[in-house]
Image (cartoon, rainbow, N blue to C red):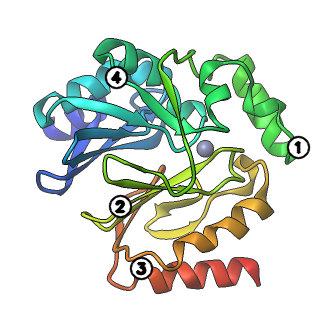
Amino acid sequence: MMTKVLHLIKPSVITIQPDKLWQITLRFPPVIGMETNCWLLNGEQGLTLIDCGCSSHGEEIITASRALGEIKRIIITHGHPDHAGAAAAISRALNIPVFAHEEEICFLKGTKTVSAEAGSLICKCILWIGDRTGFVIPKVENCLPLQDQEEIAGIKILYTPGHTPGSISLFDTTTRALFCGDNLHTMFRKPVMGHEWFTLDKSTRDGCLRKYQNLDVTRLLAGHGKPYESGALPKELKDIMDKTLR
Ligand SMILES: [Zn+2]
């Protein structure tokens, strides 16, 4: 019972691969809210934090990660407030850089907002309401741009825009993990395409996810939902893409 209560008030840290890969699950609003994931990946160049929850989650992530090592860098899959919200606080507190695709840097620096970009009206409205109700990304000072196919700390960057203009996915060969941000989710245990209400340009997103189908992956780690592991994952991803693009 006590473990369950603690689970509600602390972020849950789950080991996916010992000494290599962990999931930190956060809730927004706290305790009762929706879950969002961030990930800690331990490589030759130390710990990388992939995504970082909402603006209120900075201290929770730093505390949760302390026993695992020193975070050396943050990589953001995309500039939505439930993925990049705590980037500024963590970057400042640990004096580490925040990496994002070059087209996403403007949203982290606050020179543009995603809701003002061209795309789906429903998605823009949802983002606009978020902007006006404090669901925002505090300005990140120490931002560095990434490009398609670049490698950083052994992690391959795949430019997969559409959910936002500079959405990226990350592929790590040592853990055979694909971090797909919100392009797919696993909230119903199986991978499915991310909801179009939260996606600016669905057809661009759908088209570029073909990049997933030839990756040697066994783990799909989405922004929302449990880790999904399968020896047949490349085929399953191809089937999802075939169905979507039919
Ligand atoms: Zn998103």
Image coordinates of residue 139 in percent, x first then y, are: 57, 15
What residue would you read off at disc 2?
A: 227
User: CB atoms at circles 3 and 4 under 8 Å apart?
Assistant: no
Q: Check the image and report above or below for 52 versus 134.
A: below
Q: Secondary structure at mark 4?
A: loop
Between tags 1 and 3, which lies in front? 3
Horizontally, is 42 left or right of 173 in the view?
left
Q: Is mark 2 within 8 Å of ligand 1?
A: no
What residue would you read off at disc 4?
A: 96
Between tags 3 and 4, which lies in front? 4
Q: CA distance from mark 2 to mark 4?
A: 27 Å
Along the line of sight, which residue is nearer the eye, 108 or 154?
Answer: 154
What residue would you read off at disc 1?
A: 121
Comes first in the chain, label 1 or label 2: 1
Sort mark 4 into few (<14), some (14-19) or many (20+) by Cα contacts within 10 Å: some
What residue would you read off at disc 3?
A: 233
Q: Ligand 1 quadrant?
A: top right
Residue occupying image coordinates x 61% and y 48%: 167
Residue occupying image coordinates x 74% and y 26%: 113
Amino acid type shown at disc 1: Leu
Horizontally, is 20 left or right of 93 in the view?
left
Q: CA distance from mark 1 to mark 4?
A: 36 Å
Amino acid type shown at disc 4: Ile
Q: Check the image and report above or below for 29 versus 13.
A: above
Q: Secondary structure at mark 3?
A: helix
User: CB atoms at circles 1 and 4 under 8 Å apart?
Assistant: no
Q: CA distance from mark 1 to mark 2?
A: 31 Å
Q: Is mark 3 within 8 Å of ligand 1?
A: no
Q: CA distance from mark 3 to mark 4?
A: 33 Å
Sort mark 1 into few (<14), some (14-19) or many (20+) by Cα contacts within 10 Å: few
Amino acid type shown at disc 2: Pro
Amino acid type shown at disc 3: Leu
